[in-house]
Image (cartoon, rainbow, N blue to C red):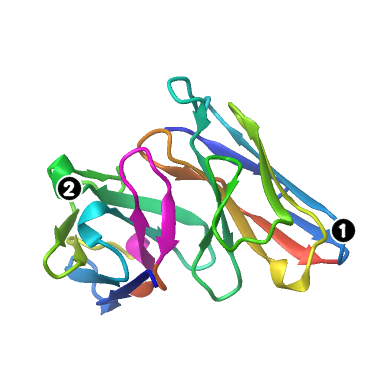
Amino acid sequence: EVQLAESGGGLVQPGRSLRLSCTTSGFNFGDYAISWFRQAPGKGLEWVGLIATKTYSETTVYAASVSGRFTISRDDSRTVANLQMNSLQTEDTAIYYCTRVKGSGWPVDYWGQGTLVTVSS
Amino acid sequence: DIVMTQSPDSLAVPLGERATINCKSSQSLLYSLNNKNYLVWHQQKPGQPPKVLISWASSREFGVPDRFSGSGSGTDFNLTISNLQAEDVAVYYCQQYYGIPWTFGQGTKVEIK
């Protein structure tokens, strides 16, 4: 069974950093890109970024709203992807989801359960 | 960025009836080299993460009931739920993966009348 589980969320002050992890199982992690999305309380879905597979040099792309502050990485040996979030702002408050993607030009096919990040003083 | 616009924002449909959601994109999502539309429909039930229902505009994911169907091409797409069931109460989002950044419609809330 394909599973993705986010962890690392919590309350953080503006300007601080937080690292989220996406722990996976049930599939060959190295064959899939991982994409992160977020959903502010009561709002719609927003794409955050994506990391490609090793075959595609683990290329990363980001939404303009997080580019330069957020970094996605992956560890194929541990089947984990991470989202490093720096210089957090109140508008980054959201549930963060990781998803599995076959590759560039392919759709998401599985979502994780999400982890809540609250940025507040 | 590709702008995705859904209509209506919400709709209430009697049990067993049909619900249709429209999604329009600001540019074509049809890739000419493979004749595929780069559009996915997600379902998000209250208090749950989203779930993929349909990809490539019309291909149902494994295990999705056949009362869910996707149609359309280019810039105009529909999600139809025939024979609406109580468990279909959710917010439905269209999303394009044709270009970066991936973008979503604002969501359509489906309720039982």
Residue B17 position (above or below residue B3) = below
Judge by depth and name the residue closer to the eye, A69 or B88: B88
Quadrant placement of the N terminus of chain B: top left
**Which chain does tag 1 point to?**
B
Q: Residue at x 60, y 39 (%)?
A: B5
Camera sees residue A121: no
Q: Amino acid at mark 2?
A: Gly
Where is A119 relative to A53, above or below?
Answer: below
Left or right for B51, reference A20: right
How busy is the neighbourhood of tag 1: few (under 14 within 10 Å), some, or many (20 plus)?
Answer: few
Q: Quadrant of residue A71?
A: bottom left
Above/below status of B77 relative to B30: below
Residue A64 visible, this orientation: yes
In front here: A46 or A87?
A46
| Labels 1 and 2 within one chain | no
In percent of width and height, residue B43 lies at 59, 60
**Any mark on residue B88, and which?**
none
Q: Which residue is mark 2?
A: A68
Image quadrant holding the C terminus of chain B, namely bottom right
Question: Could you say whether the residue bearing mark 2 is in a helix, strand or loop?
Answer: loop
Of labels 1 and 2, the one closer to you: 1
Closer-to-camera residue (A57/A35): A57
Q: Is residue A51 magenta?
A: no
What residue range appears in magenta? A91-111
